[in-house]
Image (cartoon, helix red, strand yellow):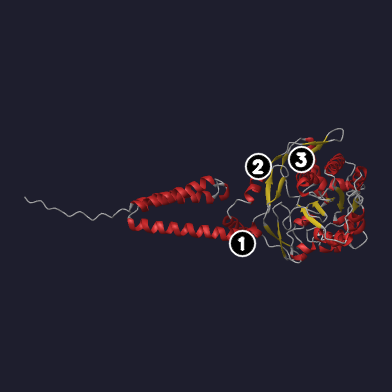
Amino acid sequence: MNSITHPEAPRTPRAPTWIRGALVAAGLVFVTFALLQADRLGGNTALPYKALLTLGALVAAGAALPVRHAERLLLCVVTFSACAVLLEVVADRVLTPLLRPPYRFDSQRIFALAPSQESVFKKLPINGGEAVTHRINAYGYRGAEIGEKASRPRVVIYGDSFIHAAYTVDGETFAYQLGRVLAGAAGRDVEVINAGVSSYGPDQISVALEADLPRLRPDIVVVSIYAGNDYGDLVRNKMFRVDSDGKLVRNDWKLDPQIRRRLELNQRELMLLKAGRALRHRFASKPVDEQGSDGGATLFSNRDHLLGESMREYESYVRAGDSTVYNTHVDYFNADVSLRPSSESARYKIALMQAVLGQIRDLAQSARVGLVFMIIPHASDVARDYDTWGSADTTKYPEYRGRNLTAPIEVAAKALGVPVVNLQDAFGKVDARTLYFTGGDDHWNAAGQKLAAEVVGAFVASNVPGRPLPSR
């Protein structure tokens, strides 16, 4: 019996070794990147992280595919990778000013501005809606790069968002306008460095001064104190305490891990992920009303609510001894100092403020630098019926006075022998509503910064013992 032999079906050829190796290598690259850069992908529970791990596994498994499919897969992987890298590079360059917050973690000051970064701040529609671009220099401060100390006088301005002025174009900021006033008084060019950092308190400024005075070598330092929230910054930041004798004591603060991670990711997270999240947020968020406010402005001007927040912060830090920093950028109004200045929390914050100002004075004296304190009043204390604030209810809060916030700082400065200018006096002589933004943004506008520069410039030019501005 003859056997019938059937021809074997042709085998599908496997991909060449180099293609299989390239696919395995590409898969390992995806997996390795995901494992080593999990934070840049949003963490090891985030969808991008899981997606990249899965993609890496699938690409590596593609090495077992027939040659035709393996070749196509490798081409897709190479094309995808090249496009993704190119898009990330372009997006990072184009979108960083818009989407990457300019803050980074700092082990001494809690946070600082990221050096050599541009940022864009958009005003509320009610304040014009313009987009303002500003650049952070290599020192981590707004403005042009700082060179070696020259023969011209150097003045450094410290403060919070009023000085940083992210909402104001360069030529209208307090620092720039102060430079013009001082130059006119001295009859020569005066270098003014804007060392303001949004949300900084006097405690962070004192720590910054320790590092800055030796390297910047200024002739004069102007330290601005914002009476509206700087008392509260001292208990939110938890960097210092005062003991029973009123002495300043450094505190071993810790930053909440989630906030620290967010600050660290500000400069590391992939821009494509930030852009995707921004798009989702934009389409998911509720539209703002015609004034450009989402209602939060009313809550932040509710004195009863703010008094509760002031008391809660004091209880957490001073009474409960919690040294973890949970809030770095939401600066509540100092309602206890304003409305109940004789309360335990207000008295502690005033004592802490006085002690921190004393440390700033000591640092300036040790460096033989002229020092001036500038007090910035809250808009509601100088502008009648300002924005959503209205007037304080003196029936409910009989201790309220318009100078409750600025007077303790002025008294402390004079006791320390430091020249002090309280802008409440100058701002109270005009319609102060024209000096501040509205719609929930209670910073001063360009007119407010101009008036402040004129007042402070004239004061600095004639009230800094041993450090007059040299003329030609």
How crowded pointer 1 is (Cα within 10 Å; few <14, some 14-19, many 20+) is rated as few
Question: Which residue is labeled 3 in the image?
Answer: 239
Quadrant of the image occupied by residue 469: bottom right
Looking at the picture, how far across and down is residue 360, in whole percent? 83, 43
Mark 2: give few (<14), some (14-19) or many (20+) Cα within 10 Å: few
The numbered mark at residue 257 is: 2
| Of marks 3 and 2, the one in the foreground | 3
Tell me the element at label 2.
Answer: helix
Q: CA distance from mark 3 to mark 2?
A: 17 Å
Observer-nearest of 465 and 71: 465
- Amino acid of disc 2: Pro
Labels 3 and 2: the sequence-earlier one: 3
> Where is mark 1, residue-wise?
94
Where 14 sits versus 438, above or below?
Answer: above
Task: Give the side of residue 85 with respect to residue 249, left or right.
Answer: left
Residue type indicated by callout 1: Val
Q: Residue at x 92, y 56 (%)?
A: 425
